[in-house]
Amino acid sequence: MFKFSTRLFTTGRLLFNQEAVSAAVPRFKVTLAARRMGPVSADKKRAKRLRKKENRIKRRIIKEVNILKQYDINNVALTVDPVLGSSDCKFVERIMEKVENQEFTLAHGVSRVEFEKLLYAAEKVALENASNNEELRKNVIETEENKRRALLTILNTRNTNVADKKKMAVKFAKEEMQRSPGDTASPEVQAAIATVKIHFAMQQVKNMPKDKKNIQHVRQMVQHRQKILKYLKRTDAKQYYYAIAKLGLSDDAVEREFNMGKQYMQDFKVWGDKVLVKETASVAKKNKKVKDLRDRVAEYNALAKRNFEILNGKTVS
């Protein structure tokens, strides 16, 4: 019935009219929610209630963002295959090309250069014994050529076994990674040898999936290589990063522990697209929660981006 210019029984600031009420309520900016929770003309109680609601939303957003960050840190995927290394690495491919190259390599560790020297010496002695008889010299040359072809057929790497090829590959790996001629004990040479052996063993794993003993042997070699590379990292970090780059590995593949079980075989498709680990109900529920969390965080980021553009008049790309 009557309008008083002041409010009685209050210890707050005196408000004389509606404009003063609007001016007294502070204008607060929302940085994460990207929207104003109430009109500027709201009374103090409502403004306080809305500020509390805004703070609750902020805390929830910060909590969910931090939970997702922690989950990504604890469940980060390996950047490369911890067993075979990166598919872009040419180290093993280059070693195998040398093994299969008939111009330089023969089976059973026979050097092509030494082989040609030996045949040349035998042919020279046979020609000297044939004196000046042209007919005998032609027969000697023809016989020596037949011997050469027969020996090349026997020593062809296609006719040798996997163990002999592995032995030659280890030899070439030593030569490529050695610090000096004759170096066989440096950590990077030992890691290169282990890498070559792992690649040969994994071929058998792919061909014989039920060979549990060979799978266990590969596990042991991978752990041994990790141990060698960790030691190299402690003693010579520069040489360590050179070695892992050369072998197609990454730092997390060396430092992180992983289980070379069915999950690894499925993730890196050792046996193709074969499903080895079925998703249980609990795992499916957990994955759905993570997916929903990612969607909410994406919405928060989009909302914060729009809020920044509104408040600053700038477009964020």
Image: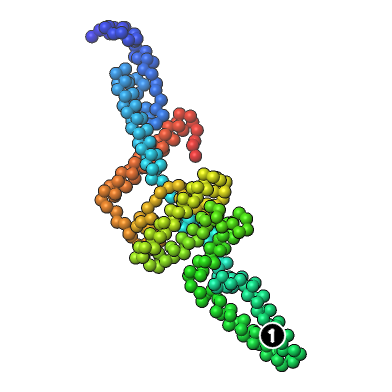
**Disc 1 target residue:** 126
- Res 49 quadrant in image: top left
> On screen, 70 above or below 240?
above
Q: Residue 260 location, x and y as percent?
A: 38, 55
Q: Where is the N terminus found, in terms of image quarters?
A: top left
> On screen, 40 above or below 100?
above
Describe residue 97's horizontal placement relative to residue 202 as left or right.
right
The residue closer to the viewer here, 149 or 279, is 149
Q: Residue 205 location, x and y as percent?
A: 40, 64
Describe residue 189's horizontal placement relative to residue 269 as left or right.
right
> On screen, 230 above or below 31?
below
Q: Answer yes or no: is residue 272 visible.
A: no
The residue closer to the viewer here, 231 or 68, is 231
Crowding around mark 1 (Cα neighbors within 10 Å: few <14, some 14 to 19, many 20+) is some
Q: Residue 170 location, x and y as percent?
A: 53, 63
**Which residue is located at x 57 percent, y 48 percent?**
239
Give the residue at the far right of this rendering: 132
Give the residue at the far left of this rendering: 1
The residue closer to the viewer here, 308 or 157, is 157
Q: Answer yes or no: is residue 223 visible.
A: yes
**Which residue is located at x 49 percent, y 58 percent?**
194
- Res 264 quadrant in image: bottom left
Q: Which type of secondary structure does the marked residue at label 1 adopt? A: helix
**Which residue is located at x 52 percent, y 48 percent?**
232
Q: Residue 142 location, x and y as percent?
A: 66, 87
Query: For the residue marked with disc 1, what is the amino acid?
Result: Ala
- Res 177 quadrant in image: bottom right
Number of numbered discs: 1
Describe residue 292's horizontal placement relative to residue 247 as left or right.
left
**Which residue is located at x 59 percent, y 57 percent?**
183
Coloring applied to the structure: rainbow
The residue closer to the viewer here, 92 or 171, is 171
